Image: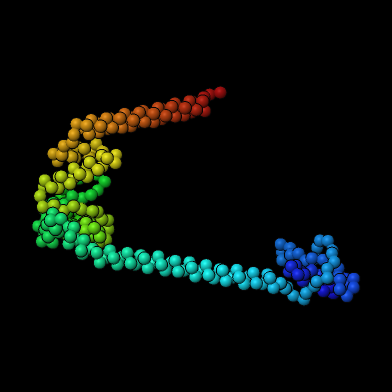
Amino acid sequence: MNKIKYLNDGRKVVVIGEINSNESIVQEIFVTKDGDEIPSGERFTTKSLHDEPVMSYKDKRQKDLERSLDAIEERIKQARGKEKQALSELKRTEAICSFPRAVKHRMTKESLAVLNSLLNGTIEYVVHDTFSIKPPVPFKDAISYFEGYHDNRRFDGIKLISLYGKSNGDLSYQINRYSDGSGSSSRIFPFNDWDSAIAKIKEIALASIEKGYFSATDYIACKNMGITFTKAIKKSLKKKYFDDMEETNSKHQQDEKKRDDSIKLKTAELNEAFAES
């Protein structure tokens, strides 16, 4: 039976024969895709054979250094991660600690008055910050939740209102659909009088116009609330709405033509299919 040996570089070989006490004829062993080990390739001579795979001191030292470097890099990575977490925690603590001071020094009298009215239940109107323009809603209607419809409609509770604050002292309010905080939610702006609520709606409308979201329905809603715009804004909106209508009408005409052409083609195909030979 041929002996299995290993070369200095780790290759596995089979000893074919010995030339003398120092030199042998060998053939390298390869592994097939099925995992079988077979001698293959050109036979060659060698003077260095080992009973098991070996590694030079240089290679071993290099691998030891590589492992050490990997360990150092991992420790550096972990240290950086801990540093980021520490900085994040510091930032969070600083924000929490600075918020009361910011509220005290930066909150306006108007914001404080709204908060006080909200806590006392004397808010008159609520403006919802939604995608489309809506008129102010009486506070009691905005916070009331009802179950059922029509004659079976009954009061079921007060919706949850959440107060949010930023480290710069700004306060904002969020109202949920249900009293337990579940369901959808939207930002609201509470006001003590109708004119302030309408002024906020105009502010929202102008921002929507700036972003290109202001629809013709929004414009009509604003007009019904007595909100006016400059002549330049009205001219720009009118042009946009009419251009949109023309584009929509043109698309409908194209769709109708495609439908008519399709009907004509189908009619011709059916007439041809039922034509008497």
Residue located at (12% from left, 60% from top): 116
Could you tell me residue 24's position as x and y percent? 86, 70
Image quadrant assignment for residue 122: bottom left
Residue plotted at (86% across, 71% down)? 23
**Quadrant in which the N terminus is drawn:** bottom right
107 lies left or right of 250: left
* Near-viewer residue (271 or 8): 8
Judging depth in this view, the residue of 254 and 2 nearest the camera is: 2
Query: In the rendered image of this protein, does residue 19 appear above or below residue 257?
Result: below
Q: Is residue 198 left or right of residue 66?
A: left
Q: Nearer the viewer, residue 10 or 161?
A: 10
Quarter of the image where one finds residue 65? bottom right
Horizontal placement of 167 versus 199: left or right? right
Tell me which residue sits at (73%, 73%) in the image. Answer: 53
The image quadrant of residue 259 is: top left
Q: Position of residue 206 (x, y in %)?
A: 22, 41
Residue 231, x across and y down, in percent = 19, 31
Vertical order, 95 against 124 (above or below): below
Horizontal and vertical percent for residue 180?
23, 63
